[in-house]
Image (cartoon, helix red, strand yellow):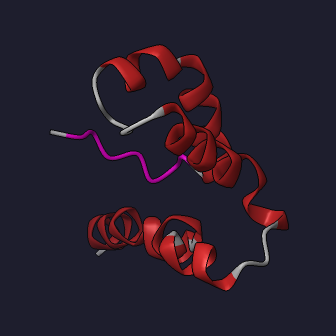
Amino acid sequence: AVQYHPEFDPGWMAGLMKQREDILLKEGAFNEKKQFDEELNFFSNYKNIDDKFILDKYKDLINTSKHTLELSNWISSIKN
């Protein structure tokens, strides 16, 4: 299972990846170091990337309204 953290933006995820690089590679979360580095580069620099293919790949992660929708819905439900 994965614990959901809608408050984590891509920059935060990049920091977590840096801290856990050895674990992520050892546990097979990435097929190889090159793949890890590419993902880390994206999350570290997502605001400066203009490659449509790459941005489409991660569109749900970088769209704040989408990755926080569940949290927003929950907050709305408890207000009513």
In the image, 31: left or right of 1?
Answer: right
Residue 73's spot in the image, x, y percent?
Answer: 33, 73
Q: Quadrant of the C terminus?
A: bottom left
Looking at the image, which is closer to me, 9 or 18? 18
- The magenta stretch spans residue 4: yes
The residue at 27%/72% (across/down) is 77
- The magenta stretch spans residue 79: no
In the image, 48: left or right of 74?
Answer: right
The residue at 32%/46% (across/down) is 4
Looking at the image, which is closer to me, 26 or 4? 26
Q: Main secondary structure of the magenta part?
A: loop
Residue 11's spot in the image, x, y percent?
Answer: 68, 45
Disc tally is: 0
Looking at the image, which is closer to me, 58 or 22? 22
Q: Quadrant of the N terminus?
A: top left
In the image, 22: left or right of 13?
Answer: left
First to last magenta residue range: 2-8
Residue 74's spot in the image, x, y percent?
Answer: 30, 65
